[in-house]
């Protein structure tokens, strides 16, 4: 089983014209943490939003389940309509629901996502109850039994969730599991670079990132120089998986760079591309597939989600029968 830990959020998605970015003073193509007042203001400027259960690690967990994998999600929600909607979504899609209700009076986390005509998504996140995830909220027995623990870097922004993050990774490591970390966003890396480097050195087996995030982590100007930094400074890291958008992905394993071309897709909404790639790749890893096969599933998964609005695509994933057939050859 794969266990994903992250901020439990409900996404509110709105397509906009480019000029709205300036009008609402948005930080285009980035994730920005906002307070409750700002969140409510942005929601008021969404004339016809689409709502869906979201959050980076939750998106990854959802797609692992959709691919047929065994997966659970740990997060925290409020006992409000949004929180109930989130938990219902987990059950509906076959995930092991390990979320807990917050006893406070804050609302469930909400991410206001604005999508411009170029497919870029601009996220404004109010963490709400999700930011209160703590060590006491962790399902330790499930973590001890999982093969891979996947954690999003967004959790590093609040002390209680940061402590839960470190504790969970330690439990998993001592139990013989592997720890996977998503760097999540450039702002996360810039805010917590030193801590991330220490964590990767001590406790992480797989790192997922994009080219901007790895350059921010290594403070290098190119991906090649960044990978050299990784080889020199993270000798115990098993794999670094770096997505390159339309240019594919690079997997660094055993000091060797392996490049994989992206799957062609018509870009409608880039929300969830990295989350879905990670899901496909982790699905391959846990099923003992090669890095080539894992990256192939990751690339096709990312292409699938960016071809629609939102992170719960309605179209049939046409590659799935092929993957199931492929897996049968390895059992």
Image (cartoon, grey):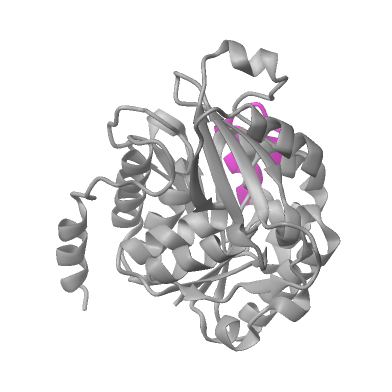
- The answer to whether residue 243 is visible is yes
Query: 237 or 82, which lies in front?
Result: 82
Q: Main secondary structure of the magenta part?
A: helix
The range drawn in magenta is 215-231
Residue 196 lies left or right of residue 121; in this view the side is: right
Query: 93 or 46, which lies in front?
Result: 46
Residue visible at 77% across and 39% down? 34
Vertically, is 327 above or below 28? below
Residue visible at 68% across and 59% down? 200
Query: 296 or 3, which lies in front?
Result: 3
Tell me where residue 176 appears, x and y as whole percent.
Answer: 56, 83
Residue visible at 66% across and 26% down? 221
Residue 228 lies left or right of residue 247; in this view the side is: right
Tell me where residue 116 appears, x and y as whole percent.
Answer: 50, 21
Report the residue that reaches farthest toward the top.
Answer: 19
Based on the picture, tell me whether residue 225 belongs to the magenta stretch: yes
Quadrant for residue 8, please give it. Answer: bottom right
Vertically, is 265 above or below 196? above
Residue visible at 69% across and 51% down? 154
Q: The N terminus appears in which quarter of the rendering? A: bottom left
Report the residue that reaches farthest toward the right.
Answer: 159
How many numbered marks does the figure carry?
Answer: 0
- The answer to whether residue 207 is visible is no
Quadrant for residue 178, please give it. Answer: bottom right
Tell me where residue 326 appears, x and y as whole percent.
Answer: 18, 64
Query: 186 or 21, which lies in front?
Result: 21
Q: The C terminus appears in which quarter of the rendering? A: bottom left
Tell me where residue 32 appears, x and y as whole percent.
Answer: 71, 36
Residue 204 lies left or right of residue 276; in this view the side is: right
């Amino acid at each position: 089983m794969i266990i994903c830990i992250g901020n439990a959020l409900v996404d509110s998605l709105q397509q906009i014209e480019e000029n709205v970015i300036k009008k609402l003073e948005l930080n285009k193509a980035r994730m920005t943490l906002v307070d409750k007042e700002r969140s409510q203001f942005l929601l008021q400027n969404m004339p016809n939003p689409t709502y869906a259960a979201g959050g980076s690690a939750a998106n990854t967990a959802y797609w692992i389940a959709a691919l047929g994998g065994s997966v659970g999600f740990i997060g925290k929600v409020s006992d409000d309509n949004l929180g109930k909607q989130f938990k219902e979504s987990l059950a509906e899609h076959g995930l092991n629901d390990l979320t807990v209700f917050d006893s406070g009076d804050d609302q469930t986390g909400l991410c206001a996502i604005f999508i411009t005509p170029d497919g870029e998504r601009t996220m404004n996140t109010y963490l709400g109850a999700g930011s209160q995830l703590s060590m006491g909220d962790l399902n330790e027995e499930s973590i001890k039994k999982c093969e891979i623990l996947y954690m999003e870097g967004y959790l590093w922004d609040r002390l209680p969730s940061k402590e839960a993050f470190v504790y969970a990774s330690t439990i998993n490591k001592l139990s013989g599991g592997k720890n996977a970390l998503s760097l999540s966003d450039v702002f996360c890396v810039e805010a917590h670079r030193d801590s991330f480097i220490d964590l990767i050195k001590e406790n992480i087996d797989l790192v997922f990132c994009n080219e901007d995030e790895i350059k921010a982590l290594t403070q290098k100007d190119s991906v090649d120089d960044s990978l050299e930094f990784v080889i020199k400074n993270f000798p115990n890291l098993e794999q670094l998986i770096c997505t390159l958008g339309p240019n594919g992905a690079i997997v660094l394993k055993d000091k060797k760079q392996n490049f994989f071309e992206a799957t062609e897709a018509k870009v409608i909404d880039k929300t969830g591309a990295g989350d879905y790639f990670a899901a496909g790749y982790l699905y391959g890893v846990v099923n003992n597939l090669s890095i080539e096969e894992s990256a192939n599933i990751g690339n096709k998964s990312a292409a699938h989600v960016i071809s629609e609005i939102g992170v719960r695509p309605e179209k049939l994933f046409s590659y799935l029968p092929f993957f199931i057939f492929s897996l049968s050859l390895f059992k």
